[in-house]
Image (cartoon, rainbow, N blue to C red):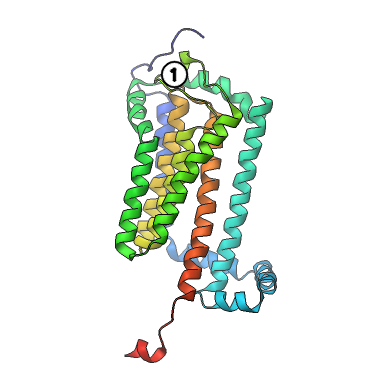
Amino acid sequence: MGQPYGPGTPGFGAVSAGILVSLALLAAVAIWVARHERLLRLLWARVCGAAVVARVVAWARERVGARGWALAHRLPAYEVAGIALLVGSAVVVALAAGFTEVLEDVLKGDGIAGIDQPATGWVATHRDVWLTAALRVVTEVGGAVPLAALALLTCAAVVWRCRSWPPVALALVGVSGIALVIVTAKALVIRDRPHISFAVIAEDGYSFPSGHATGTAAIGLLCAWMLSRWLIASWTGRVIVWAIAIGLAAVIGFSRVYLGVHYVSDVVAGWLLGMTWAGIVMLVGSWWDDTRRARAPQPHSNDAMA
């Protein structure tokens, strides 16, 4: 294990093919989603109209009370918004549970942690020179400074467009919060990185979770959400933004394993942790913005007709 594996061999191997096929599949899914807006909206409407969902909404109406439901009733498509909030909460809980499961595997050394060493060795022996050079550049995008700059630019564009301050607060919470989460998780787990013989680039610090994977998942998804909520109105534009965010998080996360500075479990945990944090911020931000809009003075019908 003391002999360095190096950047790979010239040519086009299995790993390179897998990367390109995965990106092609993501693009194909994004194109299909962009072309089937009506179908997907119809499916969502049927979900919202299902009997089980109706009972959940009725239960929520009873718990919120007359005053709270009156406020919710002022929101456009309030029942749909409430259902989206419930679905989003369930997804966040599932992501958090997934991260907890990976963390437990790492601490015990079983489960997904059992494939870490074999996967690291296999990837290191199947590197291609061109892909190594490309991922060396791509992985830098997942650093703290580029992600903070991405959040800042997104926030500036949204604020300039809608003249509203909630995006500023959400961006600050998203960036500072995920940075604190990463530092805390690394300090608590204290996991060493893969052996230096696997590494193509120099990295220090602890391995679990991958800061690049966590930060890219959190900031990338938050930026996509802010852009699609406040700036981009078209369905196709929103699909493109979300596809780019997902693809970027996937490639940067993979690059950490490929370059030999993280294990598979580090990256998977980072994705789950980043998506969990992004989901929490998005849920709170949606509730905050919808409530603020509902409490704003509503124009009278005569004013609207003038």
**257 over 245 or under it: above or below:** above
Sort mark 1 into few (<14), some (14-19) or many (20+) by Cα contacts within 10 Å: many
The x, y position of residue 107, in whole percent, is 66, 28
Q: Residue furthest top?
A: 3
Q: Residue shown at 52%/25% (left/top)?
A: 206
| Residue positioned 43% across, 11% down in the render | 4
Examine the rendering and report whether any part of residue 32 can be seen: no
Report whether 244 appears left or right of 275: left
Q: Position of residue 48 (x, y in %)?
A: 59, 68
In the displayed structure, would residue 275 be above or below residue 261? Answer: below
Q: Give the residue type at disc 1.
A: Ala
Q: Is residue 5 visible?
A: yes
Q: Which residue is mark 1?
A: 199
In the rendered structure, the answer to whether residue 283 lies left or right of residue 167 reads right
Q: Depth check: 104 or 236 in front?
A: 104
Q: Nearer the viewer, residue 248 or 89?
A: 89
